[in-house]
Amino acid sequence: MTNIPETGRTQRVQIRLVVIQVLVFSLLLTLGGRLWYLQIRNGQEYSDEAKNNHVQQVVQPAVRGSILDARGVPLADNETRLVVSASRTELMKMEDDGKSVLTRLAGVLGMKPKEVLDKVRLCDSKTPQPCWNGSPYQPIPVTDEATTQQALQIRERAEDFPGITAEPTAVRRYAAPGKANTAQVLGYLSPVTDEEITKAQDTDSPYLRSDQVGRSGLERTYDKELRGKAGVTRYEVDNLGRVIGEAKNDKAEPGSSVVTSIDARVQAVAEYELNEAMKTARQAFDKNTGENYKADSGAVVVMEAKTGRVVAMASLPNYDPNSWVGGISAKDYAKLTGKKSNFPLLNRAIQGQAAPGSIFKVISSTAAVNAGYPFDGHYPCPSSYNVGGQTFKNFESQGYGDITIGRALEVSCDTVYYGIAHKEWLKDGGMNPKKNAKDWFYKTAHQFGLGKETGIDLPNEVSGRVPDRKWKQDFYDANKDAWCKQGKKGGTYVEQIAYENCLEGDKMRAGDSVNYSIGQGDTLVTPIQMATIYAAISNGGTLYDPTVGKAIVSGDGRSVEEIKPKSHGKLPFTRKTRNEIDEALAGVATRGSAAWRFGGWPQDKIPMHAKTGTAEVYGKQTTSWFATYTKDYSIVMTISQGGTGSGASGPAVRNIYDALYGLDDSGKQDLKKALLPTPQKSLPKIQPDGSIDAPEIKPYNPASQKTPEEQTLAAVLGRRD
């Protein structure tokens, strides 16, 4: 056995002690650094988190503001219902993702299990309705029509329904006073999404997970004002979740109410008359197609001429906005969006585009005068007009000899406008335009506000189209390749058109210009654009931004923010030209193409001005237009595939005016029956408690209706313009 020297053994022990000391010191240094990081560097952050672990937040949703008509009648408000909701986060903690709980819930509610399961699943690009498109962290409504007995069953058997609540909740209600549906104007709500919550975090109007958001109509435009501010109560709780005190309480602030210029009584009349006009049109025979008119959609706008405020706006087909409340069913969603639905969610008053036909001639008349053609000059009105081998005819090939522009407006003589437009086309260089081409007809349309939005306070308005040279070139650039590929000389009609467009689709041809002069061809307008134009002619030339909102009133009624009328321009005519057009349009109603619709009208007391239009649409039946105004209102109605202007839309427009002014069939006025003898100026009063003393609205009941036989005969006898 080897003996180790004492000095060597001592050195080894010392080395081991040093290593152990270094390790201990390193551990202490690491621990100290970690403690410094937690307590000093990030101490405040962890302290705040620790506090939050002992604070629970309870959100009290704000009561959404009402949407009122001009007299204070609620068009959209709230009502208390028993709402059964499911917490998806709680259900997902269960082994079966909550299927057994939801199945039991379906039995209590009298629903099918699949129905309930579908309502609480999350929406994505592959999931059909119904599904939940809101935040997955907020309660998902299963039904807002629970009975008291059903709610008691759920609450008394809470252990069988974990994650399920049944509570009284304020739910949106679309009242339809006097059967005034007003669906497309009001819009609808749906839950806020996580994406919207994230985007709104840094704004002055952030969303809470419980919020409902306006998706269309006034609900969307004035969503911020209507939504209000939710209340949040913060409770201090111990580690076991028991409440030990109240930390902070922010009271909910109810949303403001939006007072509109809509009058529910007039709205009901407009909706009824539009529907009746479409039904009547379907009874009339279209000799061009050999079948009855389809009259598949329509719209009407009633506007205050001196302010641009919308008194009524109807669009058909329509829908019940209440179907969205509490989540829409698969059946209802298919009805609103399916291929056979005819898209009732569209507001055709601001989103429906069509060629205007002869109601466009007020623009062409102004263009002609501005181009140097005297309004009272004499212009030939032959039965037809030839351009480049193509013949353009007057309706029923009727000629009137030499007439003025005013008379051409009255009798709707197309060939007068053909002739003037053709001359201007030649002056501008024809197929090879001059650099300084005047383009009076196109320039004037833009000055009238066409080709752009009117600025109405409703979302998703479309701009229509003025097919000027720029549009022509842009359209050619986008379609040239397809035309050249499809085109074939001497082929079918479609192939021949494609062939011609391939060769010279970027050229403004003579046929394009003459067709455009009577509101045909590629021109597209909306009813709101034409109502704005005819209101401007009535008021002397001011183009107002159409508005539906009239004022924002705070929830307690103490603060009122009026929405005042705004102008976006003037019509491009002199006072003399305006008065000449005004007189001619009065002639349309007394001795022209609309005279047969205004028999007995008190022209001496309430001068009526009108223009009828029947627009031809390739592959479809003609579009009916009727544009009118008095000193107080402009009314424009259109019916797609409805036939003639005066034949289809004329009677309905006359009936709306009769209701407005309190007139009977003979033209005798009873102001007690008049709905709006003068434009509304005052605002309804909202009490400090939020209540409104609103007048009762009775459903519209026409005093005298023509028999179905008389209606059918009137439609059959309808004239083109």
Image (cartoon, helix red, strand yellow):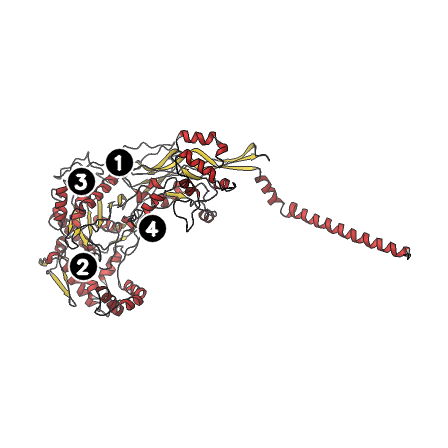
Q: Is disc 1 in contact with disc 3, using a CB cutoff of under 8 Å?
A: no
Q: Determine whether 623 is above or below 64 in the image.
A: below
- According to the picture, the residue beneath numbered tag 2 turns out to be 369
The amino acid type found where label 2 is placed reads: Val
Q: Position of residue 612 (x, y in %)?
A: 17, 51
Whether residue 587 appears in this view of the structure is yes
Kindly report which numbered mark, 2 or 4, lies closer to the viewer in this rendering.
4
Please tell me how crowded label 1 is: few (under 14), some (14-19), or many (20+) other residues with Cα within 10 Å: some
Residue 218 sits in which quadrant? top left
Q: CA distance from mark 1 to mark 3?
A: 18 Å
Q: CA distance from mark 2 to mark 4?
A: 35 Å
The residue nearer to you, when weighing 656 against 486, is: 486
Q: CA distance from mark 2 to mark 3?
A: 34 Å
- According to the picture, the residue beneath numbered tag 1 turns out to be 178
Instruction: Give the structural element (helix, strand or loop) at label 1.
Output: helix
Direction from residue 417 to residue 127 in the image, left or right: right
The amino acid type found where label 1 is placed reads: Gly
Q: Is disc 1 in contact with disc 4, using a CB cutoff of under 8 Å?
A: no
Residue 131 sits in which quadrant? top left
Q: Is disc 2 in contact with disc 3, using a CB cutoff of under 8 Å?
A: no
- According to the picture, the residue beneath numbered tag 4 turns out to be 460
Mark 1 and mark 2 lie on one chain; the one further toward the N terminus is 1
Direction from residue 124 to residue 582 in the image, left or right: left
Residue 517 sits in which quadrant? bottom left
Q: Position of residue 284 (x, y in %)?
A: 15, 48
Instruction: Give the structural element (helix, strand or loop) at label 4.
Output: loop
Q: Determine whether 18 is above or below 233 in the image.
A: below
Please tell me how crowded label 4 is: few (under 14), some (14-19), or many (20+) other residues with Cα within 10 Å: some
- According to the picture, the residue beneath numbered tag 3 turns out to be 658
Q: CA distance from mark 3 to mark 4?
A: 32 Å
Q: Determine whether 420 is above or below 44 in the image.
A: below
